[in-house]
Image (cartoon, helix red, strand yellow):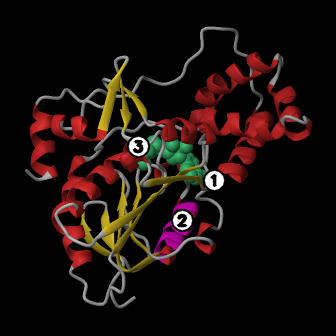
Amino acid sequence: MSLANLMSRQSSTNSGGDAPGQKTTMFFTPPMTDREFQELRRRIFDEIGIEIREHKKHLLINRLSKRLRHLGLQTFSDYLKFIEQSPQRRQEMIELVDAVTTNKTDFFREPKHFEILERQVLPDLMSDRRRSSRTLRVWSAASSSGEEPYSLAICLAEYLARQAGWKYELLASDISETILRAAVTGIYAEEKVRPVPAPLLRKYFLKGDGRFKVKPELAQTVTFKKINLKLDFQRALSGFDVIFCRNVLIYFNRESQHEIIAKHWHVLRPGGYLFLGHSETLHGCSIPFEYIAPSVYRKPVDA
Ligand SMILES: C[S@@+](CC[C@H](N)C(=O)[O-])C[C@H]1O[C@@H](n2cnc3c(N)ncnc32)[C@H](O)[C@@H]1O
């Protein structure tokens, strides 16, 4: 049975299971002056490229208050000094990234994408007579805790098992070192693996202690790496057939979104596919991707 069929069966027995809600605090929260807010926004934008909008000030206060408490600091002014001058500032920037990013993800999130990958994209890529290699190169560019790249690995392993001589290489990256460490372990609670169809769960996961671990044979097909999409990643990467860059562009302003899309264009091979999140679009973007389906695009073969 195809992966798409297994998934449609699964979704009818599945209630969805969203990730836990936003981070909040029940303790004393120090005030943040406008000057401190602007300075923190600037630091976050320079480091990650994410723009914290004015109406997110309270969310930022909530999330960073926990850091202040943890570090024993009284004010956001003290915190700003800490991230500029402390010998631990490098470590604190990692904590800051974790505090302001959202890692919500799921196995086979936006299942239609995996259906399009299996039914349309993989057959198209493999029928390209100009290919010199039988290795498909795929990148999950904001991989969070690993559910997206492991879903891709399952999809690719299942499909390529039916195509003699083909292999895949899968790169998974994120800016957060903490979330990448979690992804590498490949261990998930039972409710997290609910979207994985039962036969694939048995085939690709080990069960123990109420949790599920990705089997080493699958895990070793995924290479995890820290990559900041704001930086010039296109200098080090090239030749991808498929890029999943989903549910991360929404955090950037239009200018940064455009820059990131342009860099993805650069690292895709002609005829390669770009998948964005369902609420993300290339509408109004001047880069000449072909529209394939909602939030799915292709770099023209003659580009
Ligand atoms: C909401 S999750 C999306 C996960 C997955 N792509 C999905 O759609 O389920 C967004 C991820 O983007 C990462 N992220 C945020 N800013 C980033 C940046 N500048 N470079 C790389 N990753 C970033 C976050 O750490 C987080 O894990």
In terms of sequence position, does the residue under pointer 3 or pointer 1 come before the other?
A: 1
Q: Residues within 10 Å of mark 3 (few under 14, many from 20)?
A: few
The three-letter amino acid code for the residue at tag 2 is: Ile
Q: CA distance from mark 3 to mark 1?
A: 34 Å
In terms of sequence position, does the residue under pointer 3 or pointer 2 come before the other?
A: 3
Q: CA distance from mark 2 to mark 1?
A: 10 Å
Q: Is residue 235 magenta?
A: no
Q: Residues within 10 Å of mark 1 (few under 14, many from 20)?
A: many
Residue annotated with mark 1: 49
- Callout 2: SS: helix
Residue located at (36% from left, 78% from top): 299
Q: Quadrant of the C terminus?
A: bottom left
Look at the magenta stretch and give its main secondary structure: helix
Image location of residue 224, percent across then percent down: 53, 51
Image location of residue 103, percent across then percent down: 49, 37
Residue annotated with mark 3: 216
Q: Which mark is residue 260?
A: 2
Q: Is residue 226 left or right of residue 144?
A: right
Quadrant in the picture for residue 216: top left
- For the magenta stretch, what is the residue range? 256-265
Residue located at (50% from left, 74% from top): 267
The three-letter amino acid code for the residue at tag 1 is: Gly
- Callout 3: SS: helix
In terms of sequence position, does the residue under pointer 2 or pointer 1 come before the other?
A: 1
Q: CA distance from mark 3 to mark 2?
A: 32 Å
From where the camera sits, is residue 215 visible? yes
Q: Is residue 9 left or right of residue 16?
A: left
